[in-house]
Amino acid sequence: MRSRNKPNKASTVELSTSDPKQQLCYEGESLLRLLELIRREIESARNLDRALPEKVWLKQQFSVGVNDVTRVLERMQSLSSVKSSPQEQSLHGSHNMKMPSVQLQAILLASDCNPRWLSKHLPNLAHSRGVPILFVRDKKGGSLRLGELLKLKTAIAIGIKARGNVINQFVEKLLDNEIQVAVST
């Protein structure tokens, strides 16, 4: 069970983990600002690459939905297998394993999805792969807010694929706290 620190003035709650940038929770004004910043970065990246239809382009940039995010995470190498020695890897046969073609940089997850068991496994799976999670909580419904981001009705989980583009640069700055999303009250 996660223990929560008191929310700071900015309505951003950091959840305690071994890595402070591993899990963040956005709500209120900071959530609205975060989603607007991400929306701008998506539009900026899309304007640079108009060769593909929008749906195909979005599919290349994001993993959308709990099932798709889970599938990508399961195909990623876990941190424990990365840290093991080459001798241990050969014993377990992981030297034959290919690195997946898709890596997730971060996950946006609606913390208020119902039923809760739909996404309950994602934090542990993401942590085992070293993928940070940005929790989204909103009175309107986090899944509705995430859906609006990609022009869908709802989205419980959105994985941001590591492609080295403008979106990834923005997310890296966000995770390193170089971008201030919090709104002072």
Image (tube, grey):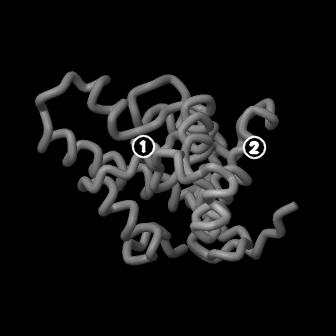
Q: Quadrant of residue 102?
A: top left
Q: State the count of labels.
A: 2
Task: Residue 120 in the image: state x and y as whole percent.
Answer: 77, 42
Query: Looking at the image, which residue is at 37% across and 70% down?
Result: 173
Q: Which of 29 and 170 is in front in this view?
A: 170
Q: How far apart are marks 1 and 2 (CA)?
A: 20 Å
Amino acid tagged 1: Val
Judged from the image, the secondary structure of the residue bearing numbered disc 1 is loop
Vertical placement of 17 versus 159: above or below?
below
Task: Residue 3 in the image: state x and y as whole percent.
Answer: 83, 69
Query: Looking at the image, which residue is at 29% across and 25% down?
Result: 56
Judged from the image, the secondary structure of the residue bearing numbered disc 2 is loop
Amino acid tagged 2: His
- Pair 1/2: label in front: 1
Residue 26 seen by the camera: no
Mark earlier in primary sequence (1, 2) = 1
Residue 140 seen by the camera: yes
Residue that label 1 marks: 102
Query: Looking at the image, which residue is at 63% across and 43% down?
Result: 110
Vertical placement of 160 versus 17: above or below?
above
* Quadrant occupied by the N terminus: bottom right
Residue that label 2 marks: 121
- Left/right placement of residue 111 relative to residue 172 reads right
* Quadrant occupied by the C terminus: bottom right
